[in-house]
Amino acid sequence: FITACGSGIVVLGTVLSLPLLVTAIIGFIGRVSGDTRLPVLRLATRNLARNSGRSAATAATLFVCVLVGSALFVGLSSLNASFDAILYHSSPVDARILGITPQTDTAQLTKQVKAVNGIKDATYVPTLDLTQNVNGESKDITVDVIDLKAIAPIARSTSGLEGLDDKTLIVGGIYDIPDGSTVTLTGAAGSVELKARVQEGWGAAISPAVAQRLNGDTPTNTTMWVRSTGNSMTPDTEHALNTAIRGQEMMVSGSASASEQMSTMFNKLSLVIYLVLGAALAIALSGLANTTDVSVLERIREIGVLRATGSPRSEIRSLIVTEGTLLAFVGGTLGLTIGTTLGAAGALSVVDESYGVSVSIPYLTLISISIITLLVGMTASLRPARRAASVPPVMALAED
């Protein structure tokens, strides 16, 4: 909420101060260009600075388009780049094979799984069906019995399990158990009181010693945790894993499908942003062309003086096109700078810092937006520039 409000204030403040910003930037460009080195550029900056209100209004159109586009692309790129870290935090195990009963030949299953190309290692994690009692309210709960040493080679991260001991129950927020509350678990062999610690990514978990007190030597169902080679499990490996256990009344729950779905979603969102930004720039092109047309009509006499004093048609055309390109440059640069900053801030505020979110700047996309913005400003000025250059000096000087 704070980031959203702050972003709104920044955008509103920038829009309101555009006349000052445009004048300052245009003035700086004019001073750098000099009177003799680039006379057309110098004259264009003077014309734009002289009518700062209209210049700011023209630049504002492209400023808003570029700001929104760059903010969305930077935010989306940052979330996409951070997705693996988010996935590891919320699902630190590459794949889980569910449905393993006491009757399952675990040795044969292990052999089948490890024979799959792309599988590095696997281990079994017992699961217990227990009864929980919190503040007098009883519910059924299924917990994993996690041996930290056994899962260390399998899990991508053990973040969140640091507090797991013989007096602690690790639970996710979905279980609606207050952090620090006392929970009584009851199993086939007895009951145990534990202190709840809310940590995401692991479901409900207890230590092997607690499981022994709750269940004794009663056979239990288990889940196989699987680690793949590389940085994450690929869809092909997950598919091969499903094929290996087919017909055994088991199922694979893996991170590859989630990663693939998220990647597809990011691509679709990027396409939508491209289309919306393209439509916005097309509308801006029409508006800028009309605004430049009006500006040319109001400066007919000035153009006539330039023509009468020896300025060729090409120089008049260059002047009008330079003015349009300058405004596109100023509006696009401001939009790109502020949009990139707001997009990065938005990505950092949406995702918890503990997930390891990182800011990713899509340089190629932003450069493309900058080039397209300049082309929009240049294209919008072509028709007015031709009209200005075609006005006879005598007719222009006769205008009141």
Image: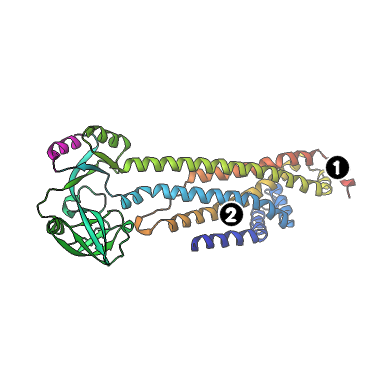
Frontmost residue, 265 versus 383: 265
Asked if residue 374 is positioned above or below residue 160 in the image, the reply reads: above
Name the residue tied to disc 2: 334
Quarter assignment of residue 189: bottom left
In this picture, which residue range is highlighted in magenta?
Answer: 102-115
- Tell me: residue 103, above or below residue 166: above
In this rendering, is residue 147 above or below 310? below
The crowding category of the residue bearing disc 2, from other C-alpha atoms within 10 Å (few below 14, some 14 to 19, many at least 20), is many
Query: SS of the residue at dot 2?
Result: helix
Residue at horizontal 22%, vertical 36%?
A: 249
Q: Is residue 105 magenta?
A: yes
Lateral position of residue 284 relative to residue 130, left or right: right
Do the residues bearing badges 2 and 1 touch, measured as CB atoms within 8 Å?
no
Which residue is more in the foreground, 25 or 231? 231
Residue type marked 1: Pro
Sequence-wise first label, 2 or 1: 2
Helix, strand or loop for disc 1: helix
Q: Which residue is mark 1?
A: 393
Magenta part, dominant SS: helix
